[in-house]
Amino acid sequence: MEQKTKVSAQDGKQELVITREFDLPLELLFQAYIDPEIVEQWMGTKVLTLESKRHGSYQFETTDPKGNKHRFNGVIHDCVVNKKITRTFEMENTPFPVQLEFLEFEKLTDDTSKLTMQIVYKSVADRDQMLKLPFAQGINMAHNRIQEIVSKLK
């Protein structure tokens, strides 16, 4: 089955570009990224903090099948409603350095929208290491869950 979320990685660049079109109005897609209750549902994580504003921050916690807790966090540098979120992302207690994420939200029609994510890593090696993980599969699963969960809010 073809994955709807596309992950593009150019050789020699330290970034990924991720795109996905959703059968969701722009406002609902954006809400899926700023509403703690919706984030918890599609990410399967606990939202400890989510301040979707300029100079805000977030911290999420997830528990693996063995009961170990994992946290990830970041700073929200900019948040323009229904347009963009610029933030950092850090997985605590891992060897991965902080990454910079640019999320852009675009209205296609009244009922469809597009998300473009540009993720910048500290180095090409860090980006390539991330791609060795089931990253593309995971982001597809997450975006499928956004589509499924937020469709019910229409």
Image (spheres, helix red, strand yellow):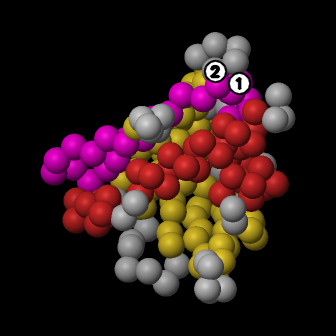
Compare residues 79 and 62 and report the one nearer the observer.
62
Residue shown at 36% from the left, 64% from the top:
133
Is residue 81 visible in the rendered image? The answer is no
Q: Residue at x 58, y 17 (%)?
A: 108
Q: Is residue 15 above or below residue 1?
A: below
Q: CA distance from mark 1 to mark 2?
A: 5 Å
Given the image, on which type of amino acid does mark 2 rest? Thr
The question of residue 17 being in magenta is answered with yes
Q: Left of 71 or right of it: where is 110? A: right
Residue 46 x %, y %: 74, 68
Disc 1 target residue: 25
Magenta-highlighted residues: 7-30
Q: Is residue 115 left or right of residue 3?
A: right
First in sequence, mark 1 or 2: give its number.
1
Q: From what the image shows, is residue 117 above or below residue 154?
A: below
Q: Residues within 10 Å of mark 2 (few under 14, many from 20)?
A: some
Mark 1 residue type: Pro
